[in-house]
Amino acid sequence: MTGVPASAAGGTGAKPAPGGKRVAVVVDQASLWNIANILTMVRLVLVPAFVLLLLQEGGYDPVWRAWAWAAFAVAMITDIFDGHLARTYNLVTDFGKIADPIADKAIMGAALVCLSALGDLPWWVTGVILFRELGITLMRFWVIRHGVIPASRGGKMKTLAQGTAAGMYVLALTGPLATLRFWVMVLAVVLTVLTGLDYVRQAIVLRRRGLAAERAAARSAVAGGSAASGAAGASGASGEGESAR
């Protein structure tokens, strides 16, 4: 919810201004229960549902795996729409900022771990992807005081490749499709590594610029303080001279 008048948010909606006039106050406020956050919560709920469906009948029943794929596909689709809706309609909330990346990594991590546990996907693939995702998340927190690393086109391609490959592995595919999913996963791993290295480069550059700006601001503050002290001293000396006349 955006553009909510203060009166609707429990305030008076106006405040006195100089001259006795009342000026309307508008408060931008996004409700926690907005469509973007609801989609994020649906994706969180789908994580355990997906795991249960995938592991039914030992994890090798084609029908149950098809249902698991459906849950996974819905989670991936909501991932596309919730962020778009939040940005387009000003529905960004603190809950969404925290829950959205958690939901993204939870559904993908659950799929990769389950597939590796079932023997369908090598553990090293799961390890590379999860290590990259966790590492980039920690690195974002490392440089957050200097700025935010924006999502790149390569990162979006990586997410699409990962989702497509994992979804194909969830389905009980055979023949040419099974071969195709292998190459899609290879592409996903390559994009995962390359975009991860690019994020590391961006983080290092961002941190260096931030530290340089902080040092420049500190030097400016010191110089300003010295100039102010010098001006005060000159003013005091001038006053003493006037008194001695």
Image (spheres, rainbow, N blue to C red):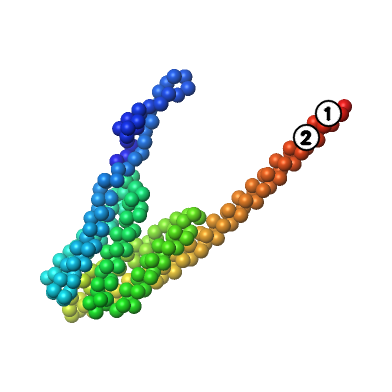
How would you rate the neighbour count of disc 1 (Cα within 10 Å): few for under 14, some for 14-19, many for 20 or more?
Answer: few
Q: In this view, does 213 lie to the left or right of 88?
A: right
Q: Looking at the image, which residue is at 32% across and 59% down?
A: 102
Q: Looking at the image, which residue is at 37% across and 63% down?
A: 155
The answer to whether residue 69 of the structure is visible from this angle is: no
Q: How far apart are marks 1 and 2 (CA)?
A: 10 Å
x and y percent of residue 93 in the render?
34, 47
x and y percent of residue 88 in the render?
32, 47
Q: Residue 236 carries which label?
A: 2
Q: Circle 1 sits on which residue? A: 242
In this view, 152 is above or below 131: above
Given the current orientation, which residue lies at the most extreme left position? 63
Q: Is residue 4 left or right of residue 135?
A: left
What is the three-letter code of the residue carrying label 2?
Gly
The answer to whether residue 125 of the structure is visible from this angle is: yes
In this view, 147 is above or below 63: above
Q: Earlier in the sequence, mark 1 or mark 2?
A: 2
Q: Is mark 1 on a helix, strand or loop?
A: helix
What is the three-letter code of the residue carrying label 1?
Glu
How would you rate the neighbour count of disc 2 (Cα within 10 Å): few for under 14, some for 14-19, many for 20 or more?
Answer: few
In this view, 184 is above or below 140: below
